Image (cartoon, rainbow, N blue to C red):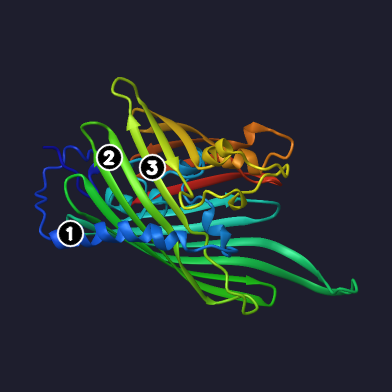
Amino acid sequence: MKKRCIFAKRMQISACKAKQNIKNVKLKNIIFYIFMLLPILATAQSGENAFNFLRLPYSARAAGLGGSNISIIEDDITLAMHNPALLINVSDKTININYMSYMSDSKLAGAAFNKAFGERAAGAITARYVDYGEFEGYTEDNIYTGSFSAKDIELAATYSYLLSNYWSGGVTGRFIYSKYEALSAIALGVDLGLNYYNPDKGLSASFVLKNLGAQVKAFEEKNEKLPVDVQLGISKKLPHAPIRLSLTLTNLHKWGKDDFYNADGSEDSTSDILLKHIILGADAIIGKNFYASIGYNFRMSKELSAGGNKWDGLSIGAGLNINKVKFGASYSKLHVSSSSFLFNLSYTL
C-alpha cells in the first residue's frame, strides 16, 4: 500500500515508505464527532458579519482555481491557509511571502513559515496585513476633520496531523485585529480541516469549517459575527492527461435568498442559489516545474457584474518551481471596483 508523509521531496508522496501505524484511535473518533456537530454550530451563526477580509484568498494557486480550493495536494504552504489539513504535505522549513492588489489603493501582504514535528505532524505560523489606504474625514456638517487610515491584521498558527495512510486533519487558530479611524475590534477565530487523499487514484477530498469564533472587542459595542464558511471540495487527476479537475462547494450552511447579493438587484431563483455554492477549477501540471490554472466562481459572477458580465467570475493562474524556489501568480476579480493580482513566493531552507 502506498503511503504519504510530510515534507516528501517534490511531493513524491506515494513513494514514502515511513511506518505510519495508527497509535491513537480515540483521536480519530474525537475528530469525527467534532465534524458531525460543528455544522450545526456554524448554521446557528447568522446576522451581520465583520472581518470580511478573511474571505480573501491567501494562495495564488487557489485564487487561480476560482478563488478558493481546499482539496488539491501540492507542496505549497499557502494552500494550508485554505485548509489546515493540507499543511502535512508541505516541505519542512518553508518560508513564504505574498502580496495582493485589492480594490482602489488597498494592498494586502503576508508571510508564513512551517516546521515538521516528527514524521506525522507539522505546524506553521502566518501573518497577514491589509492596508485600505488613506481617507479624508468630514463631520455631518461637511467640516474637514483630517485624514485617517483603515487596516486589518491577522496572526495565525496552524497544526496538522497525519491520521492514517489516507487521512489528515488540521486546525488553525487566528487572532484578528481591525482599526478604522478611532474604532477598533478584536476577534478570535478557528478553522478546522479534514482531508482524504488516495495517490493511487489521484483523488483528494476535503471538508473545512472556516472562521468559527467571536469578537472579543466590538466596534462601538456592536457584536458582529465572523464570516463563517462551511466548505466541501474534491479534486481528481485525469488518468492519462496532466490535468486535474476540482469542484469546491462553499457556504453550505447558507441557502436563503437573503444570504446572497446581486449587483443588479435581482432576486435569485432556486437554481441561482445552487450555482452560488459552486466553484469549478482545472489546472494543467506541466512536468514538475510549471502549472497553469483556470477557475470559475458563479457567486462572484453574479455579485460583481451589474451589467451582466459573466466573465467577472473567471480567474486564471500560473506557477513555476525552480529547485527550492516556488513562484505563483493569479488574476481574478474580487471587488466590483477593480481586478486583483495575487503573488506568492516560497523558499524551502
| Residue marked by disc 2 | 10
Residue type at mark 3 is Gly
Q: Is residue 275 left or right of residue 26?
A: right
Identify the residue position indicated by label 1 in the image: 118
Q: Which residue is mark 3?
A: 233
Q: Secondary structure at mark 3?
A: strand
N-terminal-most mark, 2 or 1? 2
Q: Are marks 1 and 3 in contact (CB under 8 Å)?
A: no
Could you classify mark 3 by the number of other residues whose Cα lies within 10 Å: few (under 14), some (14-19), or many (20 or more)? many
Residue type highlighted by circle 2: Arg
x and y percent of residue 141 in the render?
90, 74
Examine the rendered structure and indicate whether residue 9 appears above or below residue 102.
Answer: above
Figure check: 60 above or below 316 = below
Estimate how packed mark 2 is, as few (under 14), some (14 to 19) or many (20 or more) residues with alpha carbons within 10 Å: some
Q: Residue at horizontal 17%, vertical 55%?
A: 119
Element at badge 1?
loop
